[in-house]
Image: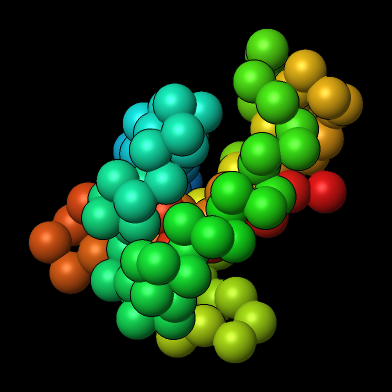
Amino acid sequence: MRRVVALCSLVVLLGVPTARADEGQAVSKAQAAAKSWLALTDAGKYGASWDEAAALFRKAISKTDWETALGKVRGPLGAMKSRKLKSATFTRTLPNAPDGEYVVIQFDTQFEGRSVVETVTAMKEKDGSFKVSGYFVK
């Protein structure tokens, strides 16, 4: 019986590094997607940022409403001066969102007008790519 328990424990432990590696790859892909998406918002291409967002995001807000809302949030901040990664956390659940694979990424960002924390949530799409599904400025 001890052999069976030991073998089961070994199988479970061997699976942990694989899961962490998969999560690490997800975080890397999500960060790349977030940086690409943020480049669009930094350039004032708000409509293009909507086009490149996750399907869930596009279902939640119209392109016109997104352009208006983002203009109200980003406009007063002025040009982006610097952005530094603060954290990136993999999760499978988020409030008010379907279960899936998400990476919540925070940046300390300096704009002309002030410093903020940007939170970008990227989600894994059906095709395996990561796309932005949420954006918050605080």
Q: Position of residue 110 (x, y in %)?
A: 77, 20
- Above or below residue 5? Residue 23 is above
- Above or below residue 36? Residue 48 is below
Instruction: Note whether residue 4 is visible.
Output: no
Residue at 59% across, 49% down? 71
Residue at 48% across, 70% down? 65
Residue 42 or 71: which is nearer the viewer? 71
In the displayed structure image, the side of residue 83 where residue 38 appears, left or right: left
Q: Which residue lies furthest to the right in this view?
A: 114
Q: Where is residue 47 in the image (x, y as percent from the top left)?
A: 34, 51
Q: Position of residue 32 (x, y in %)?
A: 37, 31
- Above or below residue 1? Residue 138 is above
Give the image quarter of residue 126.
bottom left
Question: Across the whole image, how many numbered discs are drawn on residues?
Answer: 0
In the displayed structure image, the side of residue 105 where residue 123 appears, left or right: left
Instruction: Note whether residue 82 is visible.
Output: yes
Residue at 35% across, 81% down? 59
Give the image quarter of residue 57.
bottom left
Q: Residue furthest left?
A: 127
Q: Residue furthest top?
A: 81
Q: Position of residue 24 (x, y in %)?
A: 44, 39
Residue at 60% across, 75% down? 94
Residue 20 or 133: which is nearer the viewer? 133
The colour scheme used here is rainbow
- Above or below residue 99? Residue 84 is above
Residue 98 or 7: which is nearer the viewer? 98
